Amino acid sequence: MKTTKKLMLIALMAPFALGSASALASGEKTPPPPGPGPKGFDQMCHGGFERGMFKELGLSDAQKTQLKEMREKGREAMKDEMEKNFATHREEMKAFQAQEQKLVLADNFDQAAANALAKQMAEKQAERRVEMMSKRHDMLSVLTAEQKQKYAQLMQDRQQSCEQKMADHMKHKRKMATDQE
């Protein structure tokens, strides 16, 4: 149940993350997000993955302008979407949660109903994920071939860094748990 809620929340928050990434591409100064250090685990590996990356790509003024316009249009579209569909999304999530609760509290577990509900939830999440990928594609289409290559390399480097930080984090948690015993 917690994983499903997290996935739904991630799907709903993805447009915000894209807006943040393009905001940084505009070159405007924004305060760093909270977390441990300028490139801490929380910032770089949870939602702030692309943060500041566009600054490392050497964008032209025209590209910065395009990304800024995309960000502003995206912000307006998101605002309109939230105003129009917030209640609908909220009711949909409540319905999913009620169905899930009904399934887990039932005397007998209905595997078929659980599978059907999980498929419905996955389809909604997939729709939001595809929308997010489309927006990211639009943003990255502004880049030159060389910038795209550099972007891909930066993403790969950051992914490896996050994996290492996660491994270190888990090692620390295991050590702390062992020390408490």
Image (cartoon, rainbow, N blue to C red):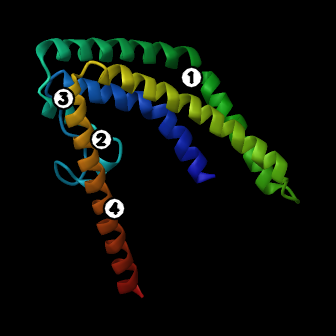
Mark 2 or mark 1: which comes first in sequence? Answer: 2
- Nearer the viewer's eye, disc 2 or disc 1? 2
Which-is-in-front pick, marks 1 and 3? 3
Proximity of marks 1 and 4: CB atoms separated by less than 8 Å: no
Residue holding disc 3:
146
Disc marking residue 48: 2
Mark 4 highlights which residue? 166
Q: Residues within 10 Å of mark 3 (few under 14, many from 20)?
A: few
Q: Is residue 127 left or right of residue 142?
A: right
Q: Secondary structure under badge 3?
A: helix
Residue 178 rendering spot, x and y as whole percentages: 39, 84
Rounded to the nearest whole Å, what is the CA distance between mark 2 and mark 1?
24 Å
In what element is the residue under mark 2?
A: loop
- Contact between labelled residues 3 and 1, with CB atoms less than 8 Å apart: no
Residue shown at the point (18%, 35%) measured from the top left:
31
Looking at the image, tell me whether mark 2 or mark 4 is earlier in sequence order: 2
User: Can you give x and y, in whole percent of width and height, for residue 88 in the image?
Assistant: 64, 23
Q: Secondary structure at mark 4?
A: helix
